Structures are given as structure tokens and as C-alpha cells.
Amino acid sequence: APVKLPDLPYDLGALEPVISGKIMELHVTKHHQTYVNNFNAALTQYAEAESKGDVAKMIQLQSALKFNGGGHVNHSIFWTNLAPPKDCAPPSGELLSMIEAQWKSLDNFQAAMSTASAGVQGSGWGWLGYNKGTGRLEIQTMPNQDPLSMTGLVPLLGIDVWEHAYYLDYKNVRPDYLKAIWKVVNWKNVEERLAAAK
């Protein structure tokens, strides 16, 4: 079945002043929609190639499936990881305990994740993931639209550091965007993702 653009849990302008409604409009209706369209097209072509036993074509389509499928998966998580500033409260419970155990404080964690995300060369994502094997949280960066699940980590919180995510508001100053985005992180969603991962 084809994938669809998910409904946002808030209005396009609801993340202002951190992320403008104009950026959200472009990011959701143009960028994410394009990943959806191209992923569905690649899925259709893959099914046709598979039915014909065209292995070369199936292999050729892998990069389009990973890039566009990853773009859809990553953004679908990202939209739920964000919330209007008035609805955002600091993390609590087990998530906060795990963050404090590993990074000593929420501020230290945010600084570490911002630094890692700022260091992504070109386009990509910064992630907080859960390692089921160790029972610990990990900060990980991923290039392009590669989904975090490729590493075996369960994605909890993603920060899009493609320029289209921030350029209209922050120009080329990625660190300013990374400093501001914590004001719209939906920690309740991150806590729900951690609970589901365990």
C-alpha cells in the first residue's frame, strides 16, 4: 500500500518563533511530500521488477527506496518530536533519569546532541536512540536520509539538519537553529517512544 503524508498534530505556524510557518509549509508540503511521492513511485517500480524477475532493476532501486523511504520515516518521527512551545515541558521520569545518568544533566545532553548535530557534514540528522542490547541511550548522526534504524538503534528524537529545515529562519548558522529547537521538543513524545522501545 502506498505511504501518505501524515497529518500534523499542530498548525503549520504553531512552532513559531522557533520554526516559521513558511519553513513548515515548504518542509511538509514540498520536501516531505516529495519523499512520499518518490518512495511510492520506487515501490511501484520495485514490485514490477520483482514480478518480472528483473534483479538488476531491483538492485538499482535500492538507493531510491532508502533515500525516499528514509526521508518519509525520518520526517514522520520529526513532526511528532516537535510541539508548540506552550505545550512543551521538560523530560521527566525514566527518560530524565537515563539522561542524567549518562550525561549528568539535561543541559549537558542537549549540548552534546547539538554539537554532534552541528558536526554533520552536508545534509543529515542528529538522533537520540535507544540501544535495546545495552539498555542505554545513544547520540548518533546519520547522513542524508539514512534512517537511524539501520544502526539497530530505536529512534526516540531526531533533529533535521538539512538546510531546508532552517535556512529561511537561521540562514547558514546551524548552531543557532540547534540552540533554539529545544524550545519546541515534545519530550512527552520522546518518553512514549522510549516506553514503546523497552
Image (cartoon, rainbow, N blue to C red):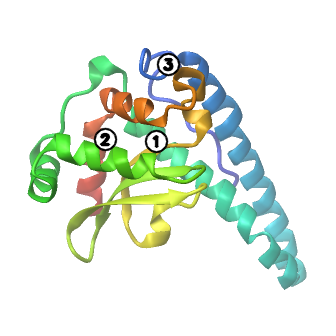
Q: CA distance from mark 2 to mark 3?
A: 17 Å
User: What x and y, as percent, mark residue 106?
Assistant: 17, 42
Q: CA distance from mark 2 to mark 1?
A: 10 Å
Label 1 is placed on what type of residue? Phe
The residue drawn where x is 54% and y is 44% is: 75
Viewer-proximal residue, 51 or 102? 102
Label 2 is placed on what type of residue? Asn
Position of 192 compared to 125: left or right? left
User: What x and y, as percent, mark residue 23?
Assistant: 59, 24
Q: Are marks 1 and 3 in contact (CB under 8 Å)?
A: no
The residue drawn where x is 45% and y is 51% is: 119
User: What x and y, as percent, mark residue 54?
Assistant: 88, 82
Q: Examine the image and state in which quarter residue 134 appears.
A: bottom left
Q: Which residue is mark 2?
A: 189
Position of 30 compared to 122: left or right? right
Label 3 is placed on what type of residue? Asp
Q: Which residue is mark 1?
A: 78
